[in-house]
Image (cartoon, rainbow, N blue to C red):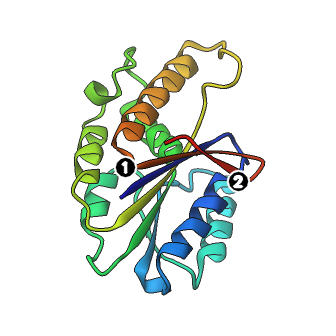
Amino acid sequence: MITLVLGGARSGKSTWAENYAMSLASRPEERCYLAAGVACDHEMRERIQKHREKREGRFYTLEEPYNLGQALLSIPPSTKVVVIDCLTTWLGNLTYKAGCKNNSDDVLGQFSEVREFLQVLKQLPFHVVIVSNELGLGIVPAEPSVRLFRDQHGRLNQLTAQLADQVYFTAAGLPLKLK
């Protein structure tokens, strides 16, 4: 089962996803949190530390900034639910690592990691709850590279939603079921 949870920044999507995952598995060792953040500066290091503390005793954590597909394959089959937080950060990591050298919104053609991730999602023995930002609700960015990232991210969300059994959109901490 795949559940995609979309929303804007600070919309409550991660909190909702975590609570949902906790309802699917009774013991912390059955709940995995797959985090994609990279501690690239002081603010991000603090943010990651706060997230770790919040999850402590509730989930076991894997941190993988680039290869979510391989990370998912490494999760023990005794796991009942995995929360991936988040696709936006992950795609940003891949874009930064690639040096922002592309000019195509073909996220599948640009990143082999995305192709692998989408293939792996289809074969997992546990429920996956995927958190992602919805970037397409704001103004059109002035910078071409930011527009390209928004376009690639929108395509990634669409591809993930096609595979998902359930899709929720969160606003003000409230979920709206889309699929």
Q: Is residue 136 above or below residue 27?
A: above
Q: Residue furthest right?
A: 172
- The residue pinned by badge 1 equals 66
Q: Residues within 10 Å of mark 2 (few under 14, many from 20)?
A: some
Q: Residue at x 74, y 53 (%)?
A: 173
Q: Nearer the viewer, residue 13 or 61?
A: 13
Q: Is residue 16 above or below residue 24?
A: above
Viewed as shown, does residue 23 lie left or right of 142?
left
Q: Residues within 10 Å of mark 1 (few under 14, many from 20)?
A: many
- The residue pinned by badge 2 equals 12
Indicate the quadrant where residue 114 lies.
top left
Measuring from the top left, give residue 108's x and y in whole percent.
29, 29
Measuring from the top left, give residue 40's x and y in whole percent.
57, 51
Q: Nearer the viewer, residue 159 or 53?
A: 159
- State which quarter of the image contains the N terminus: bottom left
Measuring from the top left, give residue 131's x and y in whole percent.
53, 51
Q: Residue at x 36, y 32 (%)?
A: 98
Q: Earlier in the sequence, mark 2 or mark 1?
A: 2
Q: Residue at x 26, y 76 (%)?
A: 77
Measuring from the top left, give residue 177's x and y in whole percent.
58, 46
Q: Is residue 152 above or below residue 97?
A: above
The amino acid marked with disc number 2 is Gly
Give the structural element (helix, strand or loop) at label 1: loop
Mark 2 or mark 1, which is nearer to you?
2
Count numbered badges in the picture: 2
Give the structural element (helix, strand or loop) at label 2: loop
Q: CA distance from mark 2 to mark 1?
A: 24 Å
Q: Nearer the viewer, residue 113 or 137?
A: 137
The answer to the question of whether label 2 and label 1 lie on touching residues, with beta carbons closer than 8 A, is no
Viewed as shown, does residue 107 lie left or right of 115?
right
